[in-house]
Image (cartoon, helix red, strand yellow):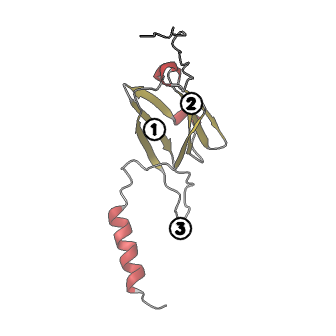
Amino acid sequence: MLFDPFREFDRMAGSLLDRRESPRLMPMDLYRDGDHFVLSADLPGIDPGSVDLDVDGQLLTIRAERTPRSKEGVQWLTRERPSGSFLRQLTLGNDIDTEAISAHYENGVLSIMIPVLEKAKPRKISIATAPDRAEVSA
């Protein structure tokens, strides 16, 4: 077995920087579809009962917990799937209808529908024309 100083350094740095008690980030996609935004967050292996979604003013917070599955006497060879707390916070704009936000969890993906307020939706503005003017002769 050869000693690889770079691999050893990477392992040490990873163990020092990896704080198991700190919240993990969850990958997400966010797009606008007509009059609402759709946020999709990846939470594979998370019990839906541990997912918490709340809005405080204009701050949307997603929290989730993944507990490690471990049997007694198991010797791990590698463990790359993170466990613990997951957290994501987003600041919503003023034109969001925070009362009508809804969420759905399926196949490890949390989908959140974020509607836009009626006043912020695009609308057509009619243009008024001036009535016919009589010609003035001097």
Mark 2: amino acid? His
Tell me which label, 1 or 2, sits earlier in the chain.
Answer: 2
Identified by mark 3, the residue type is: Thr
Density class for disc 2 (Cα within 10 Å; few <14, some 14-19, many ≥20) is: some
Q: Secondary structure at mark 3?
A: loop
Per the model, the C-alpha gap separating discs 3 and 2 is 42 Å
Q: From the image, state whether disc 3 or disc 2 is nearer to you.
A: 2
Q: Nearer the viewer, residue 110 or 10?
A: 110
User: Residue placed at 46% from the left, 23% from the top?
Assistant: 98
Residue at the far front in the pictured view: 138
Residue picked out by circle 1 = 63
Q: Is residue 22 left or right of residue 100?
A: left
Could you tell me the amino acid type at mark 1? Arg
Q: Which residue is depicted at the point 50% across and 11% down? A: 135
Which of the numbered marks, if any, corresponds to residue 78? 3
- 78 above or below 108? below
Give the mark nearer the N terminus: 3 vs 2: 2
Residue 47 position by quadrant: top right
Q: Which mark is residue 36?
A: 2
